[in-house]
Amino acid sequence: MIITPDTRQGTADHADDLARIVRLRQTYLRMVPDLQAVPDIPTPVVRTASIMFTDIRGFSRLTERFGDDPAGLLDVLNAHLKKVIRSILICGGVIEKFVGDGVMATFGATDHQPDHVHRAMAAAIGLVGANEALNRRCAAGWGFRLEVGVGIASGPVVIGAVGSAERSELGVLGDAVNIAARLVTHAGPGEVLMTGTVFRQVSDMLQSELTNQSAVRGRTGTLEIYRMSLLGGRGALA
């Protein structure tokens, strides 16, 4: 590649963004109790990334089932999350936070990952498969199966501090985050729902179908939403 002045500037800007993201994450990994004592918190960084949300189907009913044994519920949930987390991490994803019984993960929001869409899809396939393996091993003893759905969207996001000096955390915000969070609520057991942007990146490798859903709650406008079923089922899109 011929390095022109513009290319050098772009490379420098990219390196600066990555350095600021690393510093942001290190700041919050230290669990700083008072951000006023940290005067050099890096400014927010905008990146193009893929966002994934996972969710256990029917977890409220499962919680009721364990009404007298909440510790048992935690054991089951952690057995599932262990599989989910490993599938995401080995594909280069970052666990941003736990959302109830699921997780929010990003790909390309920290490291330079031009293939962040493919990484997110590989993680989705891996975690659905790992969860199914867990079911084969434990469902008979549990007396129930754990069913997981996944939502994936891709687009610009901002990484920065959310909150105030009294209470703050590192946040990842953007339209793609909102869309992925909404998609996962409609994903059936063993299904991955994705936007058209994601689908077109992986369409030559995976079989997916366009759904009849074109809107997500809390967002104006319409979207192309594709479904990939990994367990042969078809979850209803309510």
Image: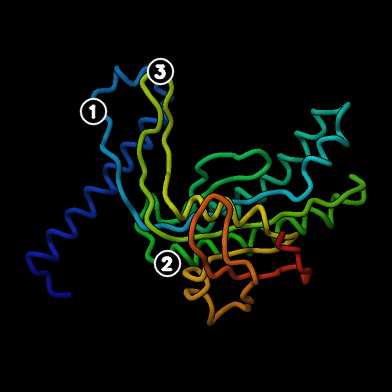
Q: Which residue is farthest bottom?
A: 204
Tag 1–tag 3 contact (CB < 8 Å): no
- Mark nearest the camera among 3 and 2 is 3
Q: Which residue is farthest front?
A: 220
Q: Earlier in the sequence, mark 1 or mark 2?
A: 1
Horizontal arrangement in the rendering, residue 219 relative to residue 155 (left or right): right
Disc 3 packing (10 Å; few <14; some 14–19; many ≥20): few
Residue located 23% across and 52% down the image: 15
Residue located 48% across and 51% down the image: 177
The kind of residue tagged 2 is Asp
Q: SS of the residue at dot 1?
A: loop
Residue 16 placed where, x, y %? Answer: 21, 48
Residue located 55% across and 59% down the image: 152
Residue located 13% across and 74% down the image: 2
Residue closest to the eye, 129 or 195: 195
- Mark nearest the camera among 1 and 3 is 3
| Residue occupied by mark 3 | 166
Q: Earlier in the sequence, mark 3 or mark 2?
A: 2
| Residue occupied by mark 1 | 40
| Residue occupied by mark 2 | 115
Residue 38 placed where, x, y %? Answer: 28, 22
Placement of 179 over or under 225, stated as above or below: above
Tag 1–tag 2 contact (CB < 8 Å): no
